[in-house]
Amino acid sequence: MSDLLISPIAHIHTDFKDKFGIPRQSGRVPSLEGRIVFLPKYRTPDALRGIEGFSHLWLIFDFSLAHRDEWSPTVRPPRLGGNKRIGVFASRSPFRPNPIGLSSVKLERIEQSDTDGVILIVSGCDLLDGTPILDIKPYLPFSDCHPDAIGGYADEVRDHKLEIIFPDYLLGMLPEDKRPTAIDCLADDPRPSYQNEPDRIYSMRFAGFDIHFRVEEDRLTVVKVDRCSK
């Protein structure tokens, strides 16, 4: 049986140039938007006919920075402190036999660009800028939503949020429309769970800025904001 060949149909563009700080799951930060730009071969409006009737979409994407020659049957989820191993198929780790991800996002609107054709604006993203999109499917609430589903070990940390101290003079350095999203991303606690060092300064690159912060117990304090050098 020959290898399956899959190629991107689009790329998504977000405010995250680095992995650190990206929400761990789609929908955790509803205001985080992304622009899906199709490759020239797929820019025909016919391929999107009827998509405006759906409020949410499934994005099937490539964990493009997680490609490896070998795979491990177990992984260490950051939310379990990075110490406990579980099966890779019982996780959403990017390090998988096939580095394919799945995200549920909200379709905000459809735009038309003179250079890029039809563009989808989606929210609730958890993707790195430039991530290859392999396929898009409509989300069907009558079959895709299971309110009584059990989330396993993930339920233990589902509601974990940090209190954010973001001084006004630092918050004011960000574009006004980016401020609520930056705060929500920080509140989701970008750190791996095994890192709990009150004196350590972390840095989250977001929307062209480096946001430096420290965390003590459940309180995150922003200490510095710089424009990214590149």
Image: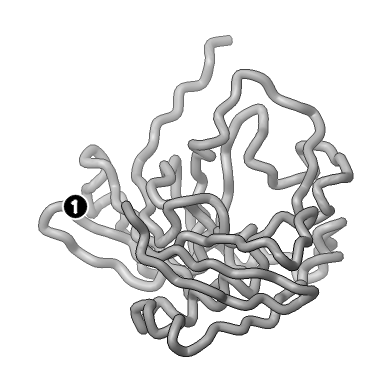
* Residue wearing tag 1: 116
The image shows residue 125, relative to residue 39, as above or below, that is below
Residue 70 position in % (x across, y down): 67, 20
For label 1, the SS is: loop
Give the left or right position of residue 22, taking residue 171 as reference: right
Quarter occupied by residue 154: bottom right
Could you tell me which residue is drawn at 27 percent across and 42 percent down? 39
Tell me what residue is drawn at x 53 percent, y 15 percent: 3
Please identify the quadrant where the N terminus is shown: top right
In this rendering, would 47 be left or right of 139?
left
Relative to 228, 194 lies left or right: right
Expressed as whole percent of the image width and height from the top left, the position of residue 125 reads 50, 62
Crowding near pointer 1: few (<14 within 10 Å), some, many (20+)? Answer: some
* Residue 143 seen in this snapshot: no
Which residue occupies 56% across, 54% down? 20
Could you tell me the amino acid type at mark 1? Asp
Q: Quadrant of residue 25?
A: bottom right
Residue positioned most to the top: 1
Question: Residue at point 79% right, 53% down?
Answer: 194
Q: Residue furthest left?
A: 114
- Picture layout, residue 21 above or below residue 214: above
Q: Give the x, y percent position of residue 146.
A: 74, 65
Q: Position of residue 133 (x, y in %)?
A: 43, 44
How many marks are shown on the rendered structure?
Answer: 1
